[in-house]
Image (cartoon, helix red, strand yellow):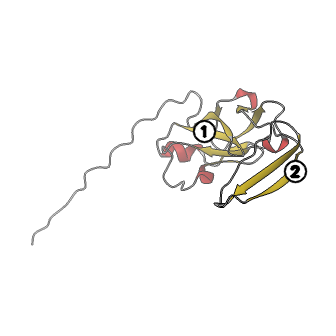
Amino acid sequence: GDTFRFTANAAGSARIRATVEDAAGNTAYIEQVIQVLELATVPKSVTISAAGNAQTIQPEGKLQMSATVQPADVSDDYKKVTWTVSWPNNIPPWYENYSDFASIDQNGLLKINVSRGALTDYGVDSVVLTVTATTKNIVKGTYKVTVIAKEQGEEPGPDPEPDPEPQISLFLF
């Protein structure tokens, strides 16, 4: 059960020979010629950008993201990225999974699936999303986008009035 790893340094053919010897000195071998057709150039980095270099997005908004895999001559199967979006836990608790709040499709289109009112009613002014693009679990890039809950120039509203103390009346007869 030994496993051996072969790493090719160039395309072409290679002859691999494995020899075994038993305690009595008898030997046996197997030989195999393999063809290395093409060496894959693997990615070293992924850079994410947003349309218009945007760093903010409005509730119920959309933003097109793109990923650049480096080096430029990376093999085709490494050029495709898998998109994900996540954020810290300051969003309303009724959004049980990420796609209820925000989603990103495999073309990099980020969508915010929540209204401004749903955020401000919960007291959330903004949420920082982390968009991630990963190539075959080798390298990933991240990009921060802030969901702005308040309207531009909007001042924070007054704190809501506290509920009045409950009044208890006791009548004795």
Three-letter code for the amino acid on which mark 2 is drawn: Val
Q: 82 and 60: which one is in front?
A: 82
- Residue 75 is drawn in which quadrant? top right
The residue lying toward the viewer, choosing from 35 and 67, is: 35
Residue for point 65% across, 30% down: 55
Residue linked to disc 2: 33
Q: In the image, which disc is placed on residue 82?
A: none
Relative to 72, residue 31 above or below: below
Task: Judge left or right: residue 95 versus residue 136.
Answer: left
Q: Residue at the location (54% across, 30% down)? A: 154
Q: Position of residue 139 (x, y in %)?
A: 68, 38
* Nearest to viewer (mark 1 / mark 2): 2
User: Badge 2: how crowded within 10 Å, few (<14), some, or many (20+)?
Assistant: few
Q: Which mark is residue 130?
A: 1
Between marks 1 and 2, how big is the CA–CA gap?
47 Å
Q: Name above or below for residue 104 compared with residue 9.
A: below
Dots 1 and 2: beta carbons under 8 Å? Answer: no
* Displayed quadrant of residue 51: top right
Drawn side of residue 172 relative to residue 64, left or right: left
Residue 86 at what x, y percent from top left? Answer: 59, 44
Q: Residue at x 70, y 45 (%)?
A: 83
Q: Between disc 1 and disc 2, whose residue precedes?
A: 2
Give the structural element (helix, strand or loop) at label 2. strand
Query: Label 1 amino acid?
Result: Thr
Q: Classify 10 Å Cα crowding around label 1: few (below 14), some (14-19), many (20 and above).
A: some
In the rendered image, residue 10, in percent from the top left (x then y), is placed at 85, 36
Total numbered badges shown on the rendered structure: 2
Query: Residue 104 vs residue 122: left or right?
Result: right
Look at the image and tell me in which quarter the N terminus lies: bottom right
Left or right: where does residue 140 sit relative to residue 91? right
Residue 33's place in the image compared with 56, above or below, is: below
